[in-house]
Image (spheres, rainbow, N blue to C red):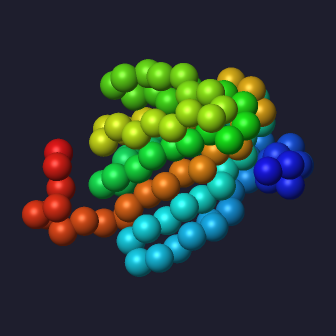
Amino acid sequence: MAQRLDAARASAHGRDAQIVVHDGVLRQSVIALVAGSELAEHNSPPAASLQVLVGRVRVTGLDESEVAAGHLTVLTHERHAVLALEDSVFLLTTVTSLDPSQRTD
């Protein structure tokens, strides 16, 4: 995690990401953001969760929530952004596609 934060601190955009699992439609990425940096508003994949490993982030969108280290949240199916309230590292788990019969929204 320290390596990801060091890379984020060295980045002009204040962030770093590394895919750690890529298995079919499943993706897991470790993402580091320095305080004040964000992943700009974007569309949500069919299914996603975010687990903060270090720090604290705010997920914005229809519902806004703060997620602290050790906590896991299911991400909205609406457009959202992620803002680092502190230097943060999180595990983002996504499913990139679903058969229409598998969708719950």
Residue 97 percent location from the top left of the image:
30, 66
- Residue occupying image coordinates x 50% and y 30%: 59
Residue 102 percent location from the top left of the image:
16, 61
Q: Residue furthest bottom?
A: 24
- Residue occupying image coordinates x 74% and y 27%: 86
Camera-side residue of 79 and 99: 99
Above or below: residue 14 compared with residue 23:
above
In the image, 81: left or right of 70? left
- Residue occupying image coordinates x 37% and y 23%: 63
The image quadrant where one finds the C terminus is top left
In the image, 79: left or right of 13? left
How many numbered marks have been drawn onto this rendered protein structure? 0
Camera-side residue of 12 and 16: 16
Q: Residue furthest front?
A: 70
On the question of residue 42 being in view, the answer is yes
- Residue occupying image coordinates x 63% and y 67%: 20
In the image, 9: left or right of 96? right
Question: Based on the displayed image, in which of its 4 quarters is residue 79 positioned?
Answer: top left
In the image, 25: left or right of 68? left
